[in-house]
Amino acid sequence: MCRAVRFDFQLYNVLWYEKGDKGRGRRFTARPVKKGACLMKHIAIWLTALVMACSLCACTSSAKFASSNSAVSSPDLVTPSVPAQAEPESSETESSEEQVSSAGSLPAQQEPPLPPETAGPAPTEELPVFSASSLRVKAGDNLFLFVKNVPESVSVTGESSLGTIPVFYPYEDMQMAIFPVRYSAEPGDYSITVACDGASETFALTVLDGGFEVEEFQVDQSVADSTVNSAKANEEYAAATQPLKESGDAAQYWSGAFSLPIHQETFRVSSSFGYTRIINGVASIHGGVDFPAPQGTPVTAPNRGRVLYAGFLQLTGNTVVIEHGFGLKSWYYHMDELCCSEGDMLGTGDLIGRVGTTGYSTGNHLHFGMSVGGVYINPWQYLDGDYFGQAVA
Ligand SMILES: [Zn+2]
């Protein structure tokens, strides 16, 4: 038995029909229904119908939505999650989420433009940065030039109104050069220009008076005639030492301060660096420090270095040249005996030779000099303390 409901909107009555045995509906007498109650019933019925209709609609639409969603997301969710099994559990989840978010939204797909933004600061960091340890230097002293952020396979070049060309070597995470100021440089204003990778910087350098004094003395003419006045002796010296002056090892062998190369309880300087010496009327500037000492006094390496030259030259007698790195060299003349050979790596305090008076010399003493790039510099910069370390700090 089933019932059908028909609405009579004109009478606001509800008529109930019941299928009879003969297949036709039997009309029940219409029950008088109050209009208010009738309205309430209508509303209730309509609401019920609406709810059912909405639920049906919602089911249909949600089913459609779900099916459409699954059609899009399932390949993205499933496919990446399978290989992600190898990842740790926590990262697997993150990985899946990333895959979904990046694959599921177009804006995420357009993230590649971000790299230029992240790559933005890199060129700034790679710009060369130039610096100098000091821009007020006495004649005969040296300064240090540094360049940071030098790209690989890019060289650093430099020039100066002093006529000296700085040579740069790798040092830690930068390039550095020891820049010597000739002892003969006139006090005044000069410039150093350093260039790297399309960038450059010019430093204004002030050279101060070195305070050098003038000495004048005589040497036995027979000695002078046989040595200093000998063109052959000078040519020999130049041929042996000039190639050494321009060389440099791309490694810092030395560290800290240089020790005195001569071992005495008290030492004396007979002729200091930079003095103008007028010998037998001929002026020359002394490129080193002379330490008078008894014959045979040990001469030792003031710092670590590689022996570039160990031999006899008519002008300077038994001579040793040591490369300490970056073109910084030390020179030893007039020794009575040589105790090292070319190629030896010496540590601080290792025996080089013994004091003598060989070559163009007026008595037993050690001539000790230091140079950079063929320019003799004041050894006391390095003997007095950690000159380089102070410059770097
Ligand atoms: Zn000397």
Image (cartoon, grey):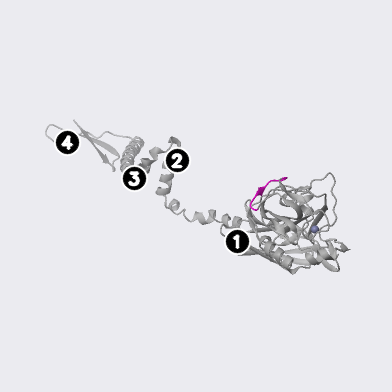
Which residue does the numbered mark 3 point to in the structure image?
75
Say which element carries label 4.
strand
**Residue at horizontal 79 percent and vertical 61 percent from the top:** 360
Mark 1 or mark 2, which has the lower sequence index? Answer: 2
Quarter of the rendered image showing ligand 1: bottom right
Q: Which residues are magenta?
A: 342-349
Say which element carries label 1.
loop
Q: Nearer the viewer, residue 301 or 196?
A: 301
Q: Is residue 44 above or below residue 197?
A: above
For discs 4 and 2, the disc positioned in front in the rendered view: 2
The label number, if any, that marks residue 94 in the structure image: 2
**Residue at horizontal 45 percent and vertical 40 percent from the top:** 94
How many angstroms separate mark 3 from mark 2 (CA)? 17 Å
Q: Residue furthest front?
A: 222
| Rendered location of residue 100, percent (x, y) | 41, 45
110 lies left or right of 355? left
Badge 1: how crowded within 10 Å, few (<14), some, or many (20+)? some
Q: Are marks 1 and 3 in contact (CB under 8 Å)?
A: no
Say which element carries label 2.
helix
How many angstroms separate mark 1 from mark 4 (CA)? 108 Å
| Rendered location of residue 243, percent (x, y) | 66, 62
How many angstroms separate mark 1 from mark 2 (CA)? 46 Å
Which residue does the numbered mark 1 point to in the structure image?
155
Mark 4 or mark 3, which has the lower sequence index? Answer: 4
Q: Are marks 1 and 4 in contact (CB under 8 Å)?
A: no
How many angstroms separate mark 4 from mark 3 (CA)? 57 Å
How many angstroms separate mark 4 from mark 2 (CA)? 67 Å
Badge 4: how crowded within 10 Å, few (<14), some, or many (20+)? some
Which residue does the numbered mark 4 point to in the structure image?
25
Which amino acid is tagged 4?
Gly
Which amino acid is tagged 2?
Glu
Mark 1 or mark 3, which has the lower sequence index? Answer: 3
